[in-house]
Image (spheres, rainbow, N blue to C red):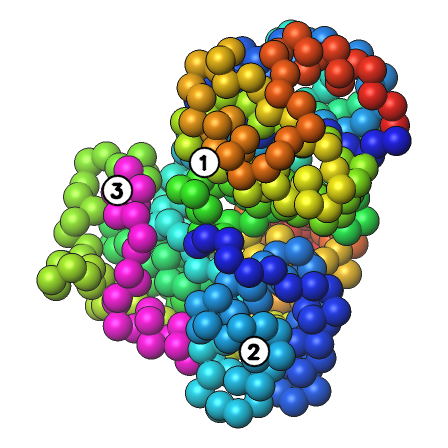
Amino acid sequence: MYKAVIIGGSAGSFQVITRILHALPPNYPLPVLLCLHRLKHVRSGFVEALSIKSGIQIIEPNDKEQIKPGKAYLAPANYHMYVELGNKIALSTEEPVNHSRPSIDLSFITAAQVYREKLVGIILSGANRDGAYGLKKIKDLGGLAIVQNPDECQVRTMTEASLKMTPVDFVFNTNEIIKFLQNIKA
Amino acid sequence: MTIRYEIGIVDTRNVIKTLLDDFGYDFRDYALTSFKRRLEYIISLYALRDADGLIAKLKNSKEFLDQFLYDITPETTEMFRDPSFWRILRDEIIPELVRTGTSKPRIWLASFDSGEELYSLSILLKELNLLNDVNIYCNVLSDHTIQRITSGRLDPKDMEVNEANYQRFNEKSKYASYYRTEGSSIVFDVSLIKDVNFIKQNTLIDEDPGAPKLIIFRNQAIYYNQLLSEKIFAKLTNSLVAGGYLAIGVKETLENTNVSNKFTLYNEAERIYKRKTN
């Protein structure tokens, strides 16, 4: 039914992401792409921190890495992360978008163009508007759009910007996001 | 950069065809997603409406082709990107290059840099007092790039990032000593790059300075598909002297390429490879 899940988050999303990753089994049937705003000059430590409680393996991919189910791909520091035709990661050092590199919009748009209606996009807590346009793109191309309930977010700007731009499919609390992800099929 | 306009794959292929048929510039094996994004950026930048507008502008204006070749290559947005890379270069690689051999070692900046990597390298060499002890060759795709670099006006978007990177590279010195401000713009000290040899390249990097001991090619192959990556890496490998170094981006790898057996990984975190001597 689906080919990939993509999650965007910024300020206040770390704990939510940790809980989601913890709940996914090692044989999870889909790849999970993670675009999270992070310090650009700190290259190491983030994967390690996320991995402590994760049920699935988390990779900070090299350019041209093949995307495989059951793994999470974290956008590396100071690079944009695209999905390229042929189900591969492509990295880019182009200018920041929405003051962000990695930019959630760019990851979401490129994933939407490759996976189209077989993509689930999720926007979590965050302090800017990055991701709102990308989520709209996922929805426009037939994918499924989910936004974390702003009332539950530490910072509601990003989720509210997304809700304003797109008639999303679901507004979920973290528990509901987890339950949904556990039940979707490849 | 903002996202204003999107083109399709057919449009992208039409532009690629024009560039090849009319001008001999081969972008067929550039990575599709980022190339498409660059076209969208250029169409927005010059208010060209769509891909047909871009094609018409390319055909009608000779000067625009050079500008296009400048814009299609993403600018290197930071100086001293990955300060730890530049520290390894300063503390280990460059001293070794000048210590060994009898002639001036050649350093080839082979990526299509917009000047930031070149000035970073030149500042590093100046601080080692070795600026006159190496020959630097710098690839460029457009005349506009040469003008930008030789004017010293790199127009950095974010001097705070550059300053912070530099401080991580060298906390003992002052970044501000390498540029002056003119009104709202920044002008770098052009004496740093006065002896640089620019090599005007086509997109396939067919010109070779010959026998470099160090090739810096960071974050360039990310804009190629697998096929072109392998082709270009093979060219660079053939050019590089035995025992010489090849630096690629920190999230790139030679692992799955046809040249991987020609190298040992000298520094994994900074992706610096050393050419085997056999």
Q: Main secondary structure of the magenta part?
A: helix
Chain letter of the residue beneath label 2 in the structure image: B
Q: Is residue B178 left or right of residue A173?
A: left
Is residue A120 located in the magenta-colored stretch of the structure?
no
User: Which residue appears at 31% of the width and 35% of the height?
Assistant: B168
Are dots 3 and 1 on a single chain?
no
SS at circle 2: helix
Residue B221, x across and y down, in percent: 62, 56
| Quadrant in the picture for residue A168 | top right
Q: Which mark is residue A129?
A: 1
Between the residue at mark 3 and the residue at mark 1, the CA separation in whole angstroms equals 23 Å
Residue located beneath label 3 in the image? B160
Q: Amino acid at mark 3?
A: Glu
Categorize mark 3 by other alpha carbons within 10 Å: few (<14), some (14-19), many (20+): few
Are dots 2 and 1 on a single chain?
no
Residue A45, x across and y down, in percent: 52, 20
Question: Depth-wise, is mark 3 or mark 2 nearer the camera?
Answer: 2
Q: Quadrant of the C terminus of chain B?
A: bottom right
| Quadrant in the picture for residue A30 | top right
The span picked out in magenta is B140-164
User: Which residue appears at 75% of the width and 69% of the height?
Assistant: B10
Q: Looking at the image, is B27 positioned above or below residue A148?
A: below
Residue A163, x across and y down, in percent: 54, 31
